[in-house]
Image (cartoon, rainbow, N blue to C red):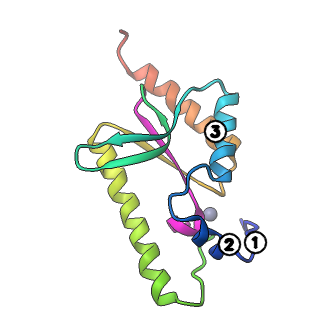
Amino acid sequence: VPYPFPASEAATAAARGNRAKDTRPEVTLRAVLHGLGLRFRKNYLVDTGEFAVRVDIAFTRARLAVFVDGCFWHGCALHQRLPRRNEAYWGPKLARNVERDRRVDEGLAEAGWRVRRVWEHEPAELAGRDIARELRQTRAESPPP
Ligand SMILES: [Zn+2]
């Protein structure tokens, strides 16, 4: 499924920085989650014990961490295109991003969090319903108070 990135996507992403707060896909997903009546914390700092990480959208009671990952920065197999200029720079840099994402996922898992990564190309409505379903399952699994 092609995703209509503007031609300058790489440049825009570079200017915006890697883990930008409040990106458009993130704002859209949060609006969907709000619409579903879900409550969460945004840009929530979690200390895993080993490192601290800011979670884009955190459901603290369910300990579900949601990240909205930009296709360019986080290595979407469908949409990441390495800029032809400075490929020697971008290749390793972007590979390191993906490695860091995996370390973050592992650290959060060890700290008792589940992680859901949402690609920026995923329709927010579908991702939102997925997350709502996951939260219902979490509640069903947890013992009554
Ligand atoms: Zn993508």
**Is 27 within the magenta?**
no
Q: Residue 138 — which label?
A: none
Q: Residue at coordinates 58% horizontally, 31% vertically from top-left?
A: 132
Write down the quadrant of residue 12 in the picture: bottom right
Q: Which residues are magenta?
A: 62-76
Q: Would you say 137 lies left or right of 53 here? A: right
**Which x, y percent locates residue 86?**
53, 89
Q: Amino acid at mark 1?
A: Pro
**Which x, y percent locates residue 87?**
51, 88
Q: Residue at coordinates 42% horizontally, 74% vertically from top-left?
A: 95
The residue that label 2 is drawn on is 9
- Can residue 12 be seen here? The reply is yes
**Disc 1 to disc 2: CB gap under 8 Å:** yes
Structural distance between the alpha carbons of marks 2 and 3: 22 Å
The residue that label 3 is drawn on is 30
Q: Quick check: 45 above or below 87? A: above
Q: Amino acid at mark 2?
A: Glu
Residue extending farthest to the top is 145
Quarter containing the N terminus: bottom right
The residue that label 1 is drawn on is 6
**In terms of image quarters, where does ligand 1 lie?**
bottom right
Provide the secondary structure element on which disc 2 rests.
Answer: helix
Whichever of callouts 2 and 3 sits on the residue coming sooner in the sequence is 2
Provide the secondary structure element on which disc 3 rests.
Answer: helix
Give whichever of 6, 102 is nearer the camera. 6
Q: Amino acid at mark 3?
A: Arg
Quarter containing the C terminus: top left
Q: Residues within 10 Å of mark 2 (few under 14, many from 20)?
A: some
